[in-house]
Image: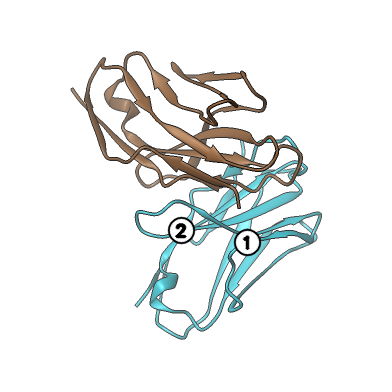
């Protein structure tokens, strides 16, 4: 079945550092790809998405590019802030099917001042 | 803006008891999804409903059942609770099922003792 593999955490960085969280996927067909963020005690919030190859999703300084050739959707941010501390989930859904999501295992990010 | 409302936010039950979790989707959303997130785990898809009919089924135990009512709210009924059912249960809603964003509630934390 479809699956998502994320970079192992936790990840700890200093403020203003460059962030990369790796995500690769296995899927039949052409899935849509997502990054969700979960702040402590809260639900999942959609951070960004891409629905086809070479699309770049971006939001709040975060970016990820749908790479079909490497089946990847790595999350990047040029300069992280303390407020970015959260758990980040990579996820996919079937492109033309129902919107159920298959999540990666999550990466806990901590940003120190 | 109105969000997905889940109730209760926290629930403590004893083994072998039953529990009912409720989800109120965003107004005009006709699709509801249920996910289970164990401690330190990624969310796992349980079941979804579109226009009050079950649209997809994931790893939902036979002890669990769910339905969507005429006002589009949904309830997840859990019987013969086990310690392993302790988790955060998320509901998400969307308008339609294809190429549409799902919005998540804050979740119900169920603890089985």
Apparent colour of chain A = brown
Quarter of the picture holding the C terminus of chain A: top left
Q: Position of residue B60 (x, y in %)?
A: 59, 68
Question: Which label lies toward us, 2 or 1?
Answer: 1
| Left or right of residue B70: residue B39 | left
Tell me if residue B16 comes above or below residue A43 in the rendering: below
What residue is pinned by disc 2?
A: B9
Q: Position of residue A53 (x, y in %)?
A: 64, 23
Residue pictured at 52% horizontal, 18% vertical: A58
Q: How is the image coloured?
A: by chain
- Residue projecting furthest to the left: A113
Nearer to us in this view, B38 or B90: B38
Which mark, residue B23? none
- Residue projecting furthest to the front: A69
Callout 2 crowding tier (Cα within 10 Å): few <14, some 14–19, many ≥20: some
What residue is pinned by disc 1?
A: B58
Q: Position of residue A30 (x, y in %)?
A: 69, 34
Q: Quadrant of residue A77?
A: top left
Residue pictured at 33% horizontal, 22% vertical: A19
* Chain name for mark 2: B
Q: Is residue B13 visible?
A: yes
Q: Position of residue A106 (x, y in %)?
A: 40, 43
Q: Quadrant of residue B54?
A: bottom right
- In 3D space, how far apart are the residues under numbered discs 2 and 1 (Cα atoms)? 23 Å
Apparent colour of chain B = cyan
């Amino acid at each position: 079945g479809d699956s998502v593999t994320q970079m192992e955490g936790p990840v700890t960085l200093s403020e203003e550092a460059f962030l990369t969280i790796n995500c690769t996927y296995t899927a039949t067909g052409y899935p849509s790809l997502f990054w969700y963020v979960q702040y402590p005690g809260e639900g999942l919030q959609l951070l960004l998405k891409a629905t086809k190859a070479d699309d770049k999703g971006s939001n709040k300084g975060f970016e990820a590019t749908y790479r079909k050739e490497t089946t990847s959707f790595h999350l990047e941010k040029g300069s992280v802030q303390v407020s970015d501390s959260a758990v980040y989930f990579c996820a996919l859904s079937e492109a033309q099917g129902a919107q159920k999501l298959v999540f990666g295992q999550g990466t806990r990010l901590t940003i120190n001042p | 803006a109105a969000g997905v409302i889940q109730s209760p936010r926290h629930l403590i039950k004893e083994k072998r008891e039953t529990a009912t979790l409720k989800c109120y989707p965003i107004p005009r959303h006709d699709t509801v999804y249920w996910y289970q997130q164990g401690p330190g785990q990624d969310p796992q898809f349980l079941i979804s409903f579109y226009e009050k009919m079950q649209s997809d089924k994931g790893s939902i135990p036979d002890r669990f059942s769910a339905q969507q009512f005429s006002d589009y709210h949904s309830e997840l009924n859990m019987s013969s609770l086990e310690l392993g059912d302790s988790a955060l249960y998320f509901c998400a809603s969307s308008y339609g099922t294809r190429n549409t964003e799902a919005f998540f509630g804050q979740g119900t934390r169920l603890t089985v003792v």
